[in-house]
């Protein structure tokens, strides 16, 4: 899949949820947008994070899980994949009737999971892909002090105001960049940290390297020490 699918998962079983997260974090074509340990809270998580696919583990409480599947299916919030340790035919049929599009049996194999995501991706909207491609906007000033940082920050915040967008501002002004000052944030990581770990970079590590502003905008600032930019 050329595009990245955003997933949200719910599983009250901490161990199973951790195993599922480990599987997802090893797949470059998915972004784990959110996780939840309560069926009751998952609809609001889906509303806030707008995932492409909701992965629902049903074994902890099948009845409550089926109600959740019906609720999400009727709202059209996202595609639904069900996960269970059981391969009982009646349970699979019940989940499909509730609105699930895929049923995966634990333990999940990576290739099996990828095939399910491919089917979900291609079947949505009559074959139109829900996978989100990226758009890159570059803002550069002809000289210092012309307001390019201000424009970049304000544009980023405006785009991030739409909850359907994931917006990252990368400050490439290595010597004088001050996007973090504009946003009044103190980042834990900078551009140098990402570049030094590019060989093991995945979506999870990248997201942990970003600083989230109250506007919803993510920031990756210039290196704090100039020598780190080399």
Image (cartoon, rainbow, N blue to C red):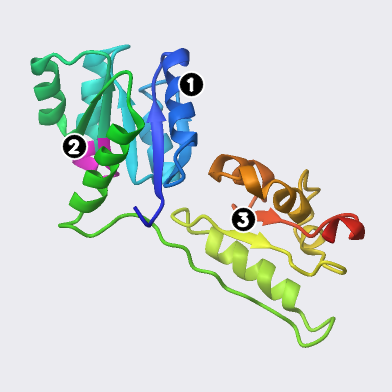
Q: Is residue 76 magenta?
A: yes
> Looking at this view, is 67 or 221 the one in front?
221
Q: Tell me the residue that label 3 is attached to.
A: 217
* Residue 73 vertical position relative to residue 215 in the rendered view, above or below: above
**Alpha carbon of mark 3 to alpha carbon of mark 1: how far?**
27 Å
Q: Which residue is mark 2?
A: 101
Above or below, 215 against 37 in this view is: below
Q: How would you rate the neighbour count of disc 1 (Cα within 10 Å): few for under 14, some for 14-19, many for 20 or more?
A: few
- Which callout, 2 or 3, points to the residue nearer the camera? 2
Which residue is denoted by mark 1 in the rendering?
18
Q: Secondary structure at mark 3?
A: loop
Q: Are marks 2 and 3 in contact (CB under 8 Å)?
A: no
Query: How busy is the neighbourhood of tag 3: few (under 14 within 10 Å), some, or many (20 plus)?
Result: many
Camera-side residue: 60 or 19? 19
Tell which of 50 and 114 is nearer to you.
114
Quarter that holds the C terminus? bottom right
Residue 197 x, y percent position in the rendering: 70, 46
Please report the bounds of the magenta region as a residue range.
73-80
Mark 2 or mark 1: which comes first in sequence?
A: 1
């Amino acid at each position: 899949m050329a595009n990245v699918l955003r997933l949200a998962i719910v599983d009250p079983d901490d161990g199973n949820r951790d195993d599922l997260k480990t599987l997802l974090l090893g797949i470059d074509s998915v972004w784990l947008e959110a996780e939840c340990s309560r069926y009751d809270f998952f609809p609001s998580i889906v509303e806030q994070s707008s995932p492409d696919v909701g992965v629902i583990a049903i074994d902890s409480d099948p009845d409550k899980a089926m109600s959740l599947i019906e609720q999400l299916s009727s709202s059209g919030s996202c595609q639904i994949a069900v996960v269970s340790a059981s391969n009982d035919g009646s349970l699979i049929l019940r989940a499909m009737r509730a609105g699930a599009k895929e049923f995966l049996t634990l333990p999940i194999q990576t290739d099996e999971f990828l095939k399910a995501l491919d089917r979900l991706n291609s079947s949505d909207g009559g074959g139109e892909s829900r996978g989100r491609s990226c758009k890159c906007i570059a803002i550069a000033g002809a000289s210092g002090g012309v307001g390019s940082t201000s424009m970049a920050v304000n544009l980023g915040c405006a785009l991030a105001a739409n909850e359907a967008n994931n917006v990252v501002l990368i400050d490439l002004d290595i010597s004088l960049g001050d996007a973090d000052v504009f946003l009044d944030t103190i980042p834990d990581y900078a551009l140098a940290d990402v570049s030094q770990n590019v060989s093991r970079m995945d979506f999870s590590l990248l997201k942990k390297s970003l600083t989230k502003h109250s506007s919803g905008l993510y920031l990756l600032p210039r290196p704090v020490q100039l020598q780190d930019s080399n």
